[in-house]
Amino acid sequence: MRTLLFFAFLVGARALTCNDGQFTTDDITCQNCTANSYCQGGVIASCPASSVSPPGASRLSDCVCPANSVINNGLCICNDGYIRVGSLCSLCPANPSSAQRREQYSPTWTLASGVSTR
């Protein structure tokens, strides 16, 4: 009889449903989404590299790239006329030589895997 009751309990049990902006790791409690991530359907996902979001974000569009850049194919890409310097996009210098453009002012972002985005 105990086995039957336990089976009935398992069959009647349903997974926890979290609101957008929340996630669960144990199907018992929902937690607010952490900064620099977004949460949908109880699942947490990281924002693209170099982008940020406030705690409780619920959509990829809540992840914001630094000034003068946009998210493109999951990456923060500098706008035309800007170059990546560290984690920021800075205005290109006036009339750099072609050697400078290739070596110092490349808009290429290299991912952790070593893949070039140029």
Image (spheres, rainbow, N blue to C red):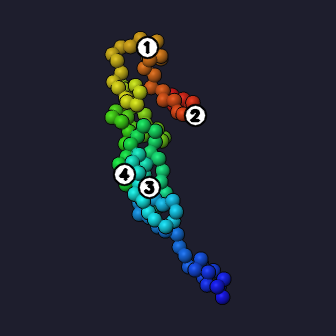
- Find numbered disc 1 in the image and state the secondary structure of the residue it sits on: helix
Q: Nearer the viewer, mark 4 or mark 1?
A: 4
The residue indicated by pointer 4 is 55
Do the numbered discs 4 and 1 sit on residues whose CB atoms are within 8 Å? no
Which label is found at residue 100? 1
Give percent across and percent down for residue 48: 46, 42
| Label 3 vs 2, first from the N-terminus | 3
C-alpha distance separating marks 3 and 4: 10 Å
The residue indicated by pointer 3 is 39
Give percent across and percent down for residue 5: 61, 84
Q: On screen, 113 above or below 97?
A: below
For image coordinates 44% across by 17% down, the residue present is 104
C-alpha distance separating marks 4 and 1: 40 Å
For image coordinates 41% across by 11% down, the residue present is 97
The residue indicated by pointer 2 is 113
Give percent across and percent down for residue 62: 37, 49
C-alpha distance separating marks 2 and 1: 26 Å
Q: Amino acid at mark 3?
A: Cys
Among the 4 quarters of the image, the one containing residue 10: bottom right
Which quarter of the figure is the N terminus placed in?
A: bottom right
Residue count near mark 4 (Cα–Cα under 10 Å), binned few <14, some 14–19, many ≥20:
some
Can see residue 7?
yes
State the residue lying farthest toward the front.
2
